[in-house]
Image (cartoon, rainbow, N blue to C red):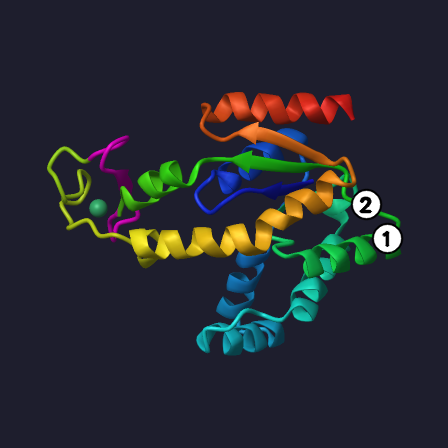
Amino acid sequence: MILLGPPGAGKGTQAAILSQTLKIPHISTGDIFRANIKSGTELGVIAKRYIDEGKLVPDDITIGIVEDRLKSDDCINGFIMDGFPRTIPQAEMFDQMLDKHQKAVELVVNIQVPDEAIIKRMSGRRMCACGRTYHVENNPPQKEGLCDTCGGTLYIRDDDREETVIERLKTYHQQTSPLVAYYEAKKLVLNVDGMKPIDETTKEILTAIEKK
Ligand SMILES: [Zn+2]
């Protein structure tokens, strides 16, 4: 299964719930890169070089780590891809690679959330150094700008700044939206409304999987 949707659509949240329910791993290429960078593996060193230069990690490196990951025993009954593929060339490489291992993409869940809602969701996020997170509208602290737990000053992550979010949405629409058409041609897409409560979206996805 592949999860598609703009940044902030709740892909990570759904992936975590589905992974637990279906007992198949949640594979996030971002997480794999971060883990490799942290433990200083050869892959981590290479990936870090690109990321430090503000460049995207090349597709052949990314597909290599995905292939490696999918060889693990826990992927025998399926997997949930989150954050990959991001572009048509990556999707084509991914199909070829799966084919080589007698596997195939079975379902593509497209979580739809309007841009304005994403901007509101993300730009309202506030973080504390202690790890607690807030939202100015949905989950505000008792005292504005201060953490309920430790009293620390709340801050906005760079990724959540409105101008950054707008930029990421632009990239998403240019690069990743065409993937929906790519998979629609293969009749694999399930469109779900990401504005609904989290558990309703989960139910919708699980029902679609049962039908498969
Ligand atoms: Zn705190």
Residue 71 in picture, x, y percent from top left: 77, 55
> Are the residues at dot 1 and dot 2 in contact (C-beta closer than 8 Å)?
yes
Q: Relative to residue 3, is residue 193 drawn left or right?
A: left
Q: Residue at x 43, y 43 (%)?
A: 8
Label 1, label 2: how many angstroms apart (C-alpha)? Answer: 6 Å
* Image vertical order of residue 46 relative to residue 18, above or below: below
Which residues lie in the magenta part?
127-140
In-front residue for pair 108/176: 176
**Which quadrant does the N terminus fall into?**
top right
Specify the farthest residue to the left. Answer: 143
The reply to whether residue 80 is visible in this rendering is no
Residue 127 in picture, x, y percent from top left: 27, 48
Any mark on residue 212, and which? Answer: none
**Which quadrant does the C terminus fall into?**
top right
Indicate the secondary structure of the residue bearing disc 1.
helix
Residue count near mark 1 (Cα–Cα under 10 Å), binned few <14, some 14–19, many ≥20: few
Magenta stretch secondary structure, dominant: loop
Identify residue type, mark 1.
Asp
Any mark on residue 99, and which? Answer: 1
Q: Residue at x 25, y 53 (%)?
A: 129
Q: Relative to residue 159, is residue 139 drawn left or right?
A: left
Residue 158 in picture, x, y percent from top left: 31, 58
Indicate the secondary structure of the residue bearing disc 2.
loop
Residue 121 in picture, x, y percent from top left: 34, 39
The reply to whether residue 108 is visible in this rendering is yes
In-front residue for pair 7/199: 7
Q: Which residue is mark 2?
A: 104
Q: Residue at x 60, y 33 (%)?
A: 18
Tell whether position 163 is magenta.
Answer: no
